[in-house]
Image: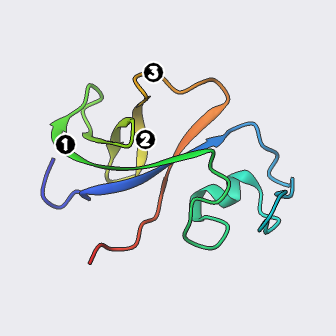
Amino acid sequence: MTMSDPQSYEILIVPEFADDKAPATGEGATGASVRGAASTGSDGGGPGAAIRSAVVTATGETGETGYPRYAGDGMVADIDPRTKAVEGLLVDGSELAYGLSARVAERAAEA
């Protein structure tokens, strides 16, 4: 990992099976689909329709995938800093369940 790589990310776990045209339901729903809300959040910055999220920070190690490793809040992830793709992920020590997807959310710069 180089010093130009981000030191932390927010990972969102979202249902992959959601219909892009299905409206959100519940208090504070904006009508955004799960997929649409996942990348930017229903309010433009929050986790949106994610069922779980975690802020992971750089460990200084390289994961089995060859990408920098990040850990925190029960998640260990290998993230490609160029594409922001989650290349490997353990949630509470287990692989991600079928039907779920991991996304990297935009985070405001730390002060």
Residue 100, by quadrant, is top right
Near mark 3 (Cα within 10 A), the count class, few <14, some 14-19 or many ≥20, is: few
Pointer 3 with pointer 1, Cβ within 8 A? no
Q: Percent from the top left, x then y, of residue 58? A: 23, 48
* Residue under numbered circle 1: 59
On residue 86, the disc is: 2
- Looking at the image, which residue is at 86% across and 58% down? 23
From mark 3 to mark 1, how far is it between C-alphas?
19 Å
Which of marks 2 and 3 precedes in the sequence? 2
Q: Amino acid at mark 3?
A: Ser
Q: Which label belongs to residue 94?
A: 3
Q: Earlier in the sequence, mark 3 or mark 1?
A: 1
The correct choice, above or below, for 28 with respect to 80 in the image is: below
Q: Where residue 37 appears, x then y in whole percent?
A: 67, 60
Looking at the image, residue 101 sits to the left or right of residue 20; the answer is left
The label on residue 97 is: none
Image quarter where the C terminus lies is bottom left
Which residue type does callout 2 highlight? Val
Which one is in front, 87 or 24?
A: 24
Position of residue 87 relative to residue 21, above or below, is above
Disc with the residue nearer the chain's start (1 vs 2): 1
Q: Residues within 10 Å of mark 1 (few under 14, many from 20)?
A: some
Mark 3–mark 2 distance (CA, rounded to whole Å):
15 Å
Q: Is residue 61 above or below residue 57?
A: above
Under circle 1, the secondary element is strand
